[in-house]
Image (spheres, coloured by chain):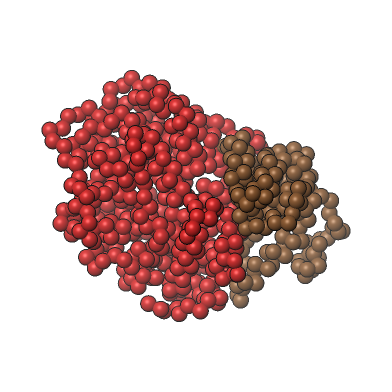
Chain colours: A brown, B red
Amino acid sequence: MVTALADTLRRAGGCPGLGAIAEAAERGRAATAVTDVQLAGQVALRKVRGMPAQQHVQAALDSARSLVSTGDLDGLRGEQVQRRVAMSFLERLIRANLLDRITPKLMQQPGRSLDDLVPYMDHCIDQADLQALADRLLAHEDGRGLRAPSRRGPRRSTRELLNTPMGQVG
Amino acid sequence: MSAVNQTVAWDLTKAGGDVVDWQQGYVLDDRPVARAFGVNLRARQSDLLDIAMAAYVADRRTRRWALLGKRDMFGFSWARRLHLRVPVREPAFWSDTTVLTPLTELLEWLTDDAWSLEFVARHTPGRPAETQGHLFSSLPRSPAAAALFSGGLDSLAGAARDLDGPSLNELVLVTVRTNSRMEAAQRQLLRELRSRSGGRVTSVIVPLGLVDAPDPSQLESTQRTRGFVFLVVGFVTATAGSLNELRSYENGVGAINLPYSAAQIGAKSSRGAHPATLGSASRLFSLVNGKAFTVVGSNLDRTKGELCAGISPDFRDLVGHTFSCDTAFTQRIRGSTACGICTSCLLRRQALWSAGMGDLDPGDRYRWDVLKEDAASQDTFPLQTMLMQAACIDRCLRSEGPWQALVREFPAVLSVPGAEAGRPGAREAIISLLRRYVDEWCRVPSSVVSRYLHGTREIEANKL
């Protein structure tokens, strides 16, 4: 999933301005205001309007506004804020490009409810090594040279993976 | 693939004639506006109509996804770069950044596209709506109001509400007509509203459409500028009638239009009646008008179900004549008026059932009746998507910090004016609106609904 995400970001031109948005999120958090984030987001959006990366910048801006507005950045500083914003953006991208697309199918399975699907989706996101990818994305905002972090475990066959409990897939 | 989408340029400098007949073959007839009040349109009003139409032409004829087509599963080619060269009567006014910037920003907000607008002097004679003399002017009898009227359920409910009391002597209902089948339905509704209100309704129907349009599959179907055109026609009509306010009857949930999934980033969720759109349009129109002009969302604090429930008995039977479907008038399928599976059809059904008006929602009105127990699973997919969203909203609202949960799940909610800054009452109003919306779903008689919502809520399935 992380490899696919890195590939998607690379092909679309990354998320230019992510660092500036994240920096503004830290300033906005300090001032308990969101104006800085919006301004940084508008500047970043202006540069990519009409380009494939536009929706990434928009998603990053949404993530940053959400984090500032909810106080989810409280207690974080500097690089931690940057990483949190970038990770939140990547999580949103996973939901947009993968999880939200398969959820209606999963809900059609007998006995499924949203209350058990949400933890499942959260688990999928937790399992992905987004922190390393977030750091790399901040270093390669335009997507050029962006590579997914190395696999943490040994390569497994699809058959093997399908028969492995989610909690043990790493 | 290229990381830069190609700019598409539209040169509309050859426009002119009796109607706005672009070289690409577009028609807008603004004479009904002038005739309604016996006035000529002013230069800036006509210019704004031309600009809106130019944007609409470019929007419809430049297909999104053109870069990668169906292979573009992540929407890389959603946003376009559009350059417009438009002939206008007052190029200096429109080129001034105090006007150009809000105009461009409004288009960008509505469409997600990069717009560059260039204005040049228009040399062709003015249209009849600008030049044809009128013997008498017939401005609306005060107190009067102007409102957008699409012929949908919200506009009927809004108009009925405005006409219920004696507070208005005249209600000007502004309609954009894009095809003849739709026009017939709109005219019937307007006739009924006029006769049942003692003649207090003035209808202004403005035809517009593509001439020699290519196959519909070659046109951009998302039409994100359509709302802009509708607002502009409403503004021009209102000011032609010396009114400084325009009402939009869209219900609050539809206007805010939260995304159904995380994949709907930005304007992929239509923002045509969004409160932020109405605010931006008000500011732009005030500049054009030379004095304050306001676009009011008069039903933003209500759900569609509440709007329906508020329709008085005098107008109730007209509900069956309204139309909500996104595709009914474009697909031309005999014997059926609505698809039943688009989100507009589904929200209509939800609203009617939640308002206790299920008798006005017969299943055979739809090509696909997804509330039937034996509805095919694949047909209920859009319904499930809507329910998924409702269930997510429900989860947020049931959490300890409902506003924070809502913002984490739907950051777009922060775009509602006042919400992000924490204006007193703004967040509470949104939470209350969405809570009522979710409750309404629980009154829809469908086992699909109960799978998503009844399991987590203690709402009586047949409350009404």
**Does the rendering let one see residue A97?**
no
Q: Looking at the rendering, which quadrant does residue B353 occupy? A: bottom left
The residue at 34%/37% (across/down) is: B291
Give the image location of residue B413, x and y in percent.
Answer: 53, 55
Give the image location of residue B34, x and y in percent.
Answer: 23, 36
The residue at 39%/62% (across/down) is: B302
Give the image location of residue B109, x and y in percent.
Answer: 50, 43
Can you say which quadrant of the picture contains the N terminus of chain B?
top right
Determine whether B265 is above or below B59 in the image.
below
Residue in the foreground of this view, choosing between A60 and B22: A60
Q: Residue extending furthest right?
A: A154
Give the image location of residue B308, x and y in percent.
Answer: 34, 65
Can you say which quadrant of the picture contains the C terminus of chain B?
bottom left
How many marks the image carries: the answer is 0
Determine whether B56 is above or below B131 in the image.
below
**Does the rendering let one see residue B281?**
yes
Q: Is residue B237 left or right of residue B213?
A: left
The residue at 60%/48% (across/down) is: A34
Determine whether A88 is above or below B294 in the image.
below
The residue at 27%/53% (across/down) is: B185
Q: Looking at the rendering, which quadrant does residue B209 occupy? A: top left
